[in-house]
Amino acid sequence: MYQTKMTKNGKLEQLYDYLNTIEDARACKGISEEECKEAPGNYFIILLSNTLTKLGDTLSNPKTVLTWVMSYINAPVYLISFIVPIRESGSMLPQIIIASYVRTLERRKWVFVIGCILQGLSIAGIGAVTLFLKGTIAGWAIIALLILFSLSRGLCSVASKDVLGKTIPKKKRGKLKGYTVSASGVLVLIAGLYIMCQSKNGADVTFYATTLFFAASLWVIAALLYSRVIEYKGATEGGKNAWKEAIDRMSLVKSDKNFRNFIIARSLLLCSALTAPFYVLLAQNQLGKESYLLGLFILANGLASIISAPIWGRMADKNSKNVMSISALLAAGLGVLMFVFITYIPFLRNSFWLYPVAFFLLGIAHSGVRLGRKTYIVDMAEGNQRTDYVSVSNTIIGAILLITGGISALVALISTEGVILVLSLFGIYGAYRSFQLPNVEA
């Protein structure tokens, strides 16, 4: 156990200690002594940078904002149905190859920086398309830019977890993620209120394009901040042949039982993410497509993050697999209830308050699922093994997400609430499989 000395950044370190109220806030488990000295400064750089990217994600969210924008510029419905699977799976599928390159780098923060800049450029491009194009051409242009965005997001996903594991001690990573989500939630709340107010004045194409340009700038600022993270050189073995290394690392699924069980559990926990657009669709079907609904759902999601993320983060530092299990049960139980309400209770089906409340509860559950599984995979490995776990699991989940998303899109043509029920039943089993995972925080 190592303790840092108070330096000229004493106030920053005091705040760092305050936010990490454990028995020994100066304990640096899982990183070296020299890295421990830089932990307070890195903690707040990562927090601020990630807060900005999360706000950018919200202001260009495919489940809400991009769907609204594509509909507004008359893009075909079949293209709109692809944006969520592309945005999520595109960032995951190539990660096993990306990780092979990342392993060759002694310092990996620059991969995150490049990924942020590319994401910003992609969203700025979508903003330009929104301003100047319409119809099918606009739809295909947005799809192409979204593919670039998604691949760039994959760079950040691999690098961020590895840098987090190298620079921030165990027992503090979950809380850092929780504070990040909470801080971005406050900003999202403000953004949602602004969009609701603007909708009363008649939001037009210029407003939506400006929103996307602002979101793009957030990634550029985040990249500049993240470049100031102090990251010491790390191991670089195993990165010579990307394809060979990728194939070799896939064998982890067969040889590592605990990792295999984590992937199974994570696959089943996709219910919290995949059901979200169907809640929005239910609201549109029952209440109409007035633009104020966009701000209302953004508000609900932001408020859910503010309330739940710090709690989930602290719980994840103690037992991340239990966070996965509890939050999955909440998402799945909510889905079953919504199916019953929509199918059998007409007066609830037509109630204005039902949908934002349900989306708020789903936001709480999804926040727990994300924080739980991210903390679990970072804590279950050390060094390059962490990069392997992240890249392999994300690649497999990306493929599963595409398949599940495609099937859900087809089933939704028959029954939107039926999709929610089916995904929720998978979530219940996912909660059980999560609970059966071994503890990794000890």
Image (cartoon, rainbow, N blue to C red):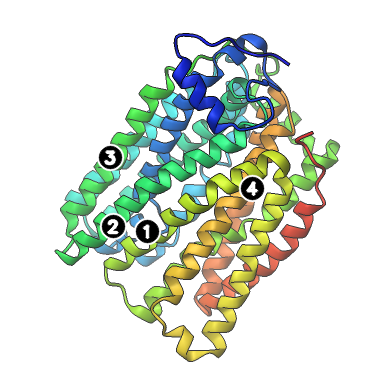
Residue 398 visible to the viewer? no
Quadrant holding the N terminus? top right
Q: Which mark is residue 299?
A: 1
Residue 272 visible to the viewer? yes
Alpha carbon separation for disc pair 4 and 3 = 28 Å
- Asked if labels 3 and 1 touch by Cβ distance under 8 angstroms, the answer is no
Of badges 1 and 3, nearer the viewer stands: 1
On screen, residue 424 above or below 113: below
Element marked by disc 3: helix
Disc 2 target residue: 193
Of badges 4 and 1, nearer the viewer stands: 1
Q: Residue at x 78, y 35 (%)?
A: 252
Q: Position of residue 215 (x, y in %)?
A: 31, 42
Choose top left, top right, bottom left or bottom right for residue 295: bottom left
Alpha carbon separation for disc pair 1 and 2 = 7 Å
Alpha carbon separation for disc pair 4 and 1 = 29 Å
Element marked by disc 2: helix
On screen, residue 277 above or below 179: below
| Residue type, mark 1 in image | Leu
Element marked by disc 4: helix
Q: Residue at x 67, y 28 (%)?
A: 170
Q: Which mark is residue 397?
A: 4
- Asked if labels 4 and 2 touch by Cβ distance under 8 angstroms, the answer is no
Q: Residue at x 47, y 63 (%)?
A: 360
Disc 3 target residue: 124
Using residue 134 as the reference point, say whether residue 412 is left or right of it: right
Element marked by disc 1: helix
First in sequence, mark 4 or 1: give its number: 1
Choose top left, top right, bottom left or bottom right for residue 272: bottom right
First in sequence, mark 2 or 4: give its number: 2
